[in-house]
Amino acid sequence: MGELKLYELKKVEIIVKGEHLSIITDLLEKAEVSGYTIVHNLSGKGSHGFHEGHLLFNEEDTLVMVISVMPEEKVEAVLEGITPLLSEHSGVVFVSDVRVSRLEKFKAGTP
């Protein structure tokens, strides 16, 4: 049996208030990122103290994380696009190296 082939890409994780989620998803769509995962109702502690997730009636006040994997050449456009938001509002971006199988799943326009 052959060895699983892995390809190097970048993982971009963006945490913002729920009210800014559409800005992030629009940005990723414009950058032609093939897909993303959204995690709602985050809890955690940061520079602004502890943030409680899972508010019952107001998802815009909760924190969300948008996770995407993309080729390195798309990362700069995403970071450039998110800079104005992060200069005015709280949030954080993590960029890390990842290796994935099935490279075709991470290229825009591929089924």
Image: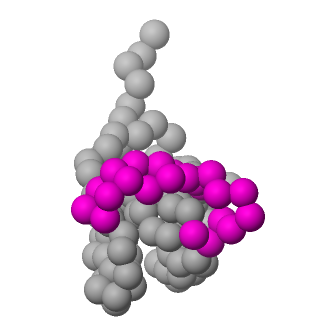
Query: Where residue 37 sits: x, y (%)?
Result: 57, 54
Q: Quadrant of residue 10?
A: bottom left
What is the quadrant of the C terminus in the image? bottom right
Q: Residue furthest right?
A: 57
Using residue 54 as the reference point, say whether residue 31 is left or right of it: left
Residue 55 lies in magenta, yes or no? yes
Quadrant of the frame with the N terminus: top left
Name which residue lies at 34% across and 51% down: 45
Residues 105 and 28: in front is 28
Residue visible at 26% across and 48% down in the picture: 97
User: Between 30 and 20, which is closer to the camera in this rendering?
Assistant: 20
Quarter assignment of residue 88:
bottom left
User: Residue 20 versus residue 51: which sits nearer the camera?
Assistant: 51
* Residue 27, image x, y percentages: 50, 80
Q: Quadrant of residue 46?
A: bottom left
**Residue 6 seen by the camera:** yes
Span colored in magenta: 40-61
In the displayed image of the protein, which residue is found farthest to the front? 49
The answer to which of 14 and 29 lies nearer the viewer is 14
Q: Is residue 36 depicted above or below 4 in this figure?
A: below
Residue under the point 32% across and 44% down: 98
Q: Position of residue 32 (x, y in %)?
A: 52, 74
Residue 26 within the magenta-colored segment of the rendering: no
Q: Is residue 35 left or right of residue 3?
A: right
Looking at the rendered structure, the number of numbered marks drawn on it comes to 0
**Residue furthest top as drawn:** 1
Can residue 70 be seen from the camera position used here? no
Left or right: where 1 falls relative to 48: right
